[in-house]
Amino acid sequence: MAGTILIIEDERDIAEVVAARLRSEGFTTEICADGQSGVERCLSLRPDLVVLDLMLPELDGIEVCRRIQRERRTPVVMLTAKDDETDMLVGLGVGADDYITKPFSPRELVARVQAVLRRAATEVPSAPRLTVGEVEIDEATRTVSRNGSPVHLTATEFDLLYTLAAAGGAVLTREQLLGRVWGYRDGSGARTVDSHIRAVRRKLGDGVIRTVHAVGYAIALPEEAS
């Protein structure tokens, strides 16, 4: 797997380390040190994926992510030094596919990048629509509606919801979800699953996905979701 990665990061040391590790994996990389130049370069370069810092001069990562998604769907892995759930949820809400909290290992970042790119490149065969209470999930068109009204989910949120719905009420552990949705298994990724679950619940309601304490998550059965 190879491609072009745009790194938008104002801390030069971090940007260089990330770029070097990605190049060692066969990727072509470019670096931008502020949000405005990052947006402009993304529109001209059309990278396969953007590694995007949350805290940037001129434009923050949330606004950068929002702007680069306007023209074309671009996979984004967001970097954040903030251990702040609100920032993570907002980032996921404007189109980020995954996030990783500083400090992080370059190896872990590469694994996240490769997993996001695999998901973006994979075409899943169409299947019948799945219904969970008031929510209808159409895999063929990758759309979700609630009570007939469309609900926008990010690509990762859709994959997570569909994976749980397709399991038919079976409980999936965080590690299983990481493997099926993100394409890797890593104990440090459990919080990623939790944050995406919270994002889906904010959009579709708390009753769609149930938490099974000390085990994982499951789609709510019809009587539970109603």
Image: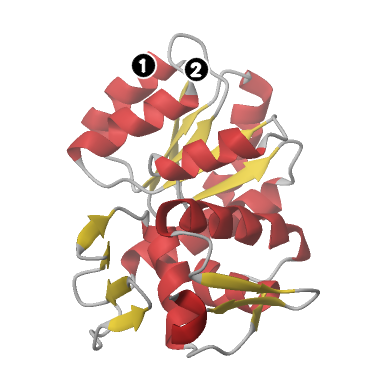
Q: Which disc number belongs to residue 37?
A: 1
Residue 190: x %, y % from top left: 71, 62
User: As drawn, is 67 to the left or to the right of 49?
Assistant: left
Q: Is residue 38 left or right of residue 137?
A: right
Q: What is the three-letter code of the residue carrying label 1?
A: Ser
The correct choice, above or below, for 65 with respect to 187 in the image is above
Which residue is drawn at the image coordinates 22% and 35% (left, top)?
70
Q: Secondary structure at mark 2?
A: loop
Q: Is residue 58 above or below residue 189?
A: above
Vertical arrangement, residue 64 with respect to residue 210, above or below: above
Image quarter of the N terminus: bottom left
Query: Which residue is labeled 2 in the image?
Result: 33
**Quadrant in which residue 10 is drawn:** top right
Question: Looking at the picture, how far across and down is residue 68, in whole percent?
Answer: 30, 33
Viewport quadrant of the C terminus = bottom left
The part of the image, by quadrant, that contains residue 121 is bottom left
Q: How many marks?
A: 2
- In the foreground, 206 or 105: 206
